[in-house]
Image: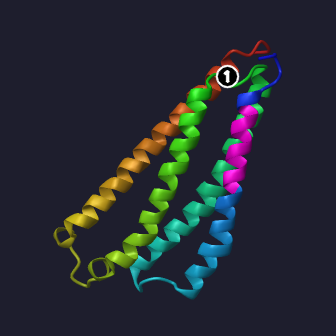
Amino acid sequence: MDKGTFEIGQLFGKRFILISLIYFIIGTTWMGPLGTIIPGPPGEAGTVYDTAHWHVVFVGFIAFFLLGVLYYVAPRLGGRDMYSKMLSTIHFWGSNILFPIAVILFAWIPFAYEAVLNSPTFNIAAIPSTLMTVYLLVLIIMFVGIGLQGVMAYNVFMTLRASKTA
């Protein structure tokens, strides 16, 4: 690869920006209006759908767009292409597989467990084991997602560390 081609950074920058636009369309033209037309279960559990909507807009659109910019700009600041195409691939596909699963779970929980979550006699012992399994799955996805951001941070750090201008 010739110095200055920045193929990996450009590829993953474009990928993250394009996927962020898809999340923007889903979050603003589908989830937002759907949430006002069919607001979900009444009571506190209905706010879980709002969590899904805001995650799609803020994480799916804004954060993924910024990741695209970071992948595009970091190689140019470092004076070389991204440190690792494999790490970039793991970050991109891991994020775009786990994130939609988490959002679907956020939106599904209030509808599937409305009676339990809105019960006036709600207590932690009344939570069905299936709901606890879903919460555990969301927690696992969250920690793997944090790990994926660590992979990205390491990749960017190593790209910038190799800079001859530093």
Q: Position of residue 56 (x, y in %)?
A: 58, 62
Taking 79 as reference, is 114 above or below it?
below
Q: Is 154 left, or right, of 134 in this rendering?
A: right
Taking 104 as reference, is 162 above or below it?
above
Q: Is residue 18 within the magenta segment?
A: yes
- Count of numbered labels shown in the rendering: 1
Q: Residue at x 21, y 69 (%)?
A: 128
Which residue reaches farthest left? 125
State the quadrant of the C terminus. top right
Taking 160 as reference, is 122 above or below it?
below
Q: Where is residue 74 in the image (x, y as percent from the top left)?
A: 73, 30
Does the image show residue 107?
Answer: yes
Q: Is 76 left, or right, of 145 in this rendering?
A: right
Query: In front here: 20 or 165?
Result: 20
Q: Is 164 left, or right, of 103 in this rendering?
A: right
Q: Residue at x 50, y 67 (%)?
A: 51
**Taken as a whole, is the magenta stretch helix, strand or loop?**
helix
**Residue where numbered disc 1 is placed:** 159
Which residue reaches farthest top? 164
Which residue reaches farthest front? 1
Q: What segment carries the magenta color? A: 9-20
Does the image show residue 70?
Answer: no
Quadrant housing residue 86: top right
Identified by mark 1, the residue type is Thr
Disc 1 element: helix
